[in-house]
Amino acid sequence: MSSGRRWPGILAFFLLAACGSGDGEFSIRQKGTAYPVELAPARGRIREYRAGFSTDYGFSVIFPLARFNPTGQRGFVLFFGPTEIRPGMEYALEGDDPPHPLGLEYHPAGGHRVTEGKILAYSTRRAGGSLQVRFDRLEPRIGGRVKGVISRAVLVGYYEGYDTAEREEPRRKMTLTIANFPFDTVFELSPFAP
């Protein structure tokens, strides 16, 4: 997966749909209808955060958009703290739960309010959001494998400031619902500086 080859996005989309958990068909829906999205292969990322004499690590699985994504930062991101995860267990969280180092976010290619400096994003960590995920394999190191399935997720839309922490609710509630979203990749060090 880290060879640098890029599969055509539509092929990656159908591969993801074909290799579901066996519990149902992969789907992304918005307002009850199919939400078309073309994804490139998943990538495992480890990011270093340095503060003084200590270093922390952030772990994520990135499902980048196959098109209109020059930086590779648009798409779905499953983030987690590996010390809190046990392979084989199913984790179910609600957006209103106390802070937990597990969540799913989505940054689409469009829908932003660029003239206002606001970017559209979706997250399971917002009120009304939820995440149900299972990790079947987790080796938290560079070159280690991470495999599992997002059984179900509800991501709630909001706008965030391009260069600020300001967040704004949309006029009408926006949600994406995901079902049976498999992942299987290896970790590499994030190319982005901490």
Image (cartoon, rainbow, N blue to C red):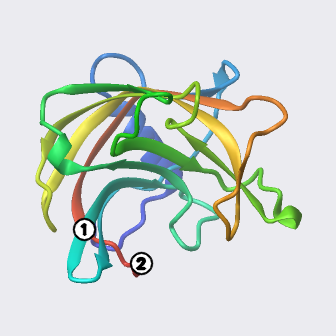
Q: Where does residue 67 sit, x and y in percent of width and height? A: 60, 60
Q: Quadrant of residue 147?
A: top left
**Callout 2 amino acid:** Phe
Q: Residue at x 74, y 54 (%)?
A: 110
Q: Where does residue 172 sit, x and y in percent of width and height? A: 81, 30
Helix, strand or loop status at disc 1: strand
Q: Where does residue 35 sit, x and y in percent of width and height? A: 64, 33
Q: Say above or below: 144 vs 38.
A: below
Q: Nearer the viewer, mark 2 or mark 1?
A: 1
Q: Say above or below: 3 vs 146.
A: below
Is 75 left or right of 2, judged from the image as shown? right
Marks 2 and 1, how far apart at CA: 15 Å
Q: Say above or below: 77 vs 141.
A: above
Is 121 left or right of 144, judged from the image as shown? right
Asked if disc 2 and disc 1 are in contact, CB closer than 8 Å, the reply is: no
Report which residue position mark 2 lands on.
192
Report which residue position mark 1 lands on.
56
Q: Residue at x 67, y 56 (%)?
A: 109
Is 51 left or right of 142, judged from the image as shown? right
**Callout 1 amino acid:** Asp
Question: Counting other residues with Cα less than 10 Å from the Cα at mark 1, is it few (<14), some (14-19), or many (20 or more)?
Answer: few
Q: Which comes before the other along the chain, label 2 or label 1?
A: 1
- In the picture, the quarter occupied by the N terminus is bottom left
Q: Quadrant of residue 140?
A: bottom left
Q: Say above or below: 72 vs 177.
A: below
Q: Residue at x 15, y 53 (%)?
A: 145
Q: Which mark is residue 44?
A: none
Helix, strand or loop status at disc 2: loop
